[in-house]
Image (cartoon, helix red, strand yellow):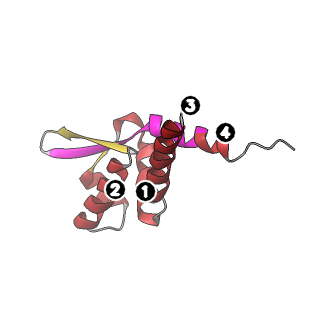
Amino acid sequence: MSIENVNVKLEVMARRFNAISHVNRLAIFELLVRSGIKGLCVGDILREQNLKAAGLTFHLKILSDAGLVSSRRQGRYTCYTASFKAMNEVISYLAINCMYSSA
C-alpha cells in the first residue's frame, strides 16, 4: 500500500472517529445501528433523542459526511440508515492497527 493510500485511509478513519466522538452523534449512530437496514426517519430519531430538529440535522450531516450514515427519501420523509460497511471498516481498523501485539 502506497504512502498516499495510507494517508487517505488515516484521513477517512480520523473523520469517522471525529464524527462519533460527540455523545449525541454516538447515540444517534448507535440508534441507527440497532434499527438495522431499515433505518429510521428523522421524526423517529427525534422521538428517541432529546434534540431539537436543527441539532439533529447538524449531527446527521457530520455522520453522513464521514460515511457512517446514508439518507433516503421515503415519501415526504427523510430516513437514515447506518453504514454497516463503514462500521465494519472502523472495527477492522482498530483490530488490525490498534490491538495487535507482537509480545
* Viewer can see residue 42: yes
Q: Which mark is residue 1?
A: 3
Q: CA distance from mark 3 to mark 4?
A: 15 Å
Q: Which residues are magenta?
A: 77-92
Q: Which mark is residue 62?
A: 2
Q: Position of residue 11 (x, y in %)?
A: 46, 49
* Viewer can see residue 30: no
Regarding mark 3 in the picture, which secondary structure is present there? loop
**Labels 3 & 2 near each other (Cβ < 8 A):** no
Q: Residue at x 41, y 59 (%)?
A: 25
In this rendering, position of residue 25 left or right of residue 95: left
Q: Which mark is residue 96?
A: 4
**Labels 4 & 2 near each other (Cβ < 8 A):** no
Which residue is labeled 1 in the image?
A: 19
Q: Position of residue 20 (x, y in %)?
A: 46, 57
Who comes first in sequence, dot 3 or dot 2? 3
In this view, the mark in front (3 or 4): 3
Residue type pointed to by label 4: Ile
Q: Residue at x 54, y 43 (%)?
A: 90
Does the magenta segment cover residue 88? yes
